[in-house]
Image (cartoon, helix red, strand yellow):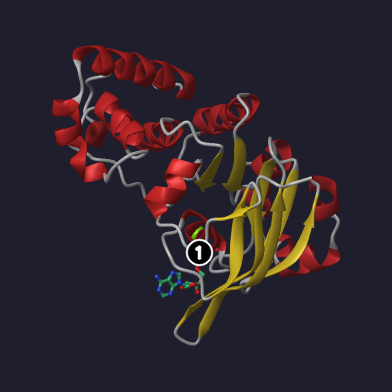
Amino acid sequence: MTHILETKAITKRFGGLVAVDSVDLQVSKGEIRGLIGPNGSGKSTLLNLISGVYPLDGGDIFLNGESVSKLSPHERAEKGIARTFQNNRLFPSLSILDNIMVGMHARTKSELHHTLFRHKMTKLEEESCRKKALDIMKFVGLKRGADYTAGALPHGERRLLEIARGLALEPQIILLDEPATGMNPAEKEWMIELTRNIRNTGITVILIEHNMRVVMEVCDRITVLNFGRKIAEGNPQEIQTNPEVIEAYLGEEEPEDVIAG
Ligand SMILES: Nc1ncnc2c1ncn2[C@@H]1O[C@H](COP(=O)(O)OP(=O)(O)O)[C@@H](O)[C@H]1O
Ligand SMILES: [Mg+2]
């Protein structure tokens, strides 16, 4: 069976530091894959390699069996790899709706050609994009008016908007980098449900998340990084009982963070 996403020995160096060290991943279609590990273990860098933000120093990345290693981030987005960033990258002065519509546009051209794009759209196209964006807004649980300014949103809702923008691509796979960070408890609960809802529409999810309760509850399989290397992989129960993981990572967690987060 071909995996939707496969990495073979991918490596990224920053000077003398090996941030991602020969990592093999095999992600099945429809899976929610958790990516965990201590701070600085290479999680965000791994997503940056998959989405093409950084070029590889070694290895190869395959989407549905086809190498995407030489493609630009935009070309990978066109092929169906969407992502959110650990620090959000919305257009703060644009409305919620426009931020989502920019996401649709990322399929074809640079995000900054947004204004141009709007001029080129026919009324009918614009109406259909608008409707789609409104549906996505509802899907991620954004309840404000579509014209609300993105920059004025509270933190948790900004994270939802970022996810909405990723979903606007109609991706095959979405990479979520700590989406629940800074969310309040109710938003965190919703984030769990939303992650499942995303998967239930057929989109594969890779989720970086430091809250162990969330990870264990939502992920089908979990990959653990430490110092850029993959040290374990398995279902939540296997990970929770893996001695090397406990030693490297879980043992260090504050009990409060594990339970309440
Ligand atoms: N752009 C960069 N330039 C230099 N070093 C970086 C860069 N990005 C990440 N690193 C380093 O690579 C390592 C892995 O970082 P990162 O992938 O952000 O870890 P994580 O997301 O697991 O916390 C860290 O030591 C970090 O300081
Ligand atoms: Mg990170």
* Residue 105 visible at all: yes
Residue bearing the label numbered 1: 45
Relative image position of residue 150 (x, y in whole percent): 26, 32
Relative image position of residue 117 (x, y in whole percent): 20, 32
Left or right, 198 with respect to 166, comes to right
Q: Nearer the viewer, residue 209 or 68?
A: 68
Q: Residue at x 64, y 56 (%)?
A: 36
Residue with the most extreme bottom position: 16
In which quadrant will I find the C terminus? Answer: top right
In which quadrant will I find the N terminus? Answer: top right
Report helix, strand or loop for mark 1.
Answer: helix
Vertical placement of residue 151 versus 211, above or below? above
Left or right, 158 with respect to 183, comes to left
Beta carbon of the mark 1 residue lies under 8 A of ligand 1: yes
Relative image position of residue 256 (x, y in whole percent): 64, 49
Crowding near the residue tagged with mark 1, few <14, some 14–19, many ≥20 C-alpha atoms within 10 Å? some
Tell me the kind of residue under disc 1: Thr
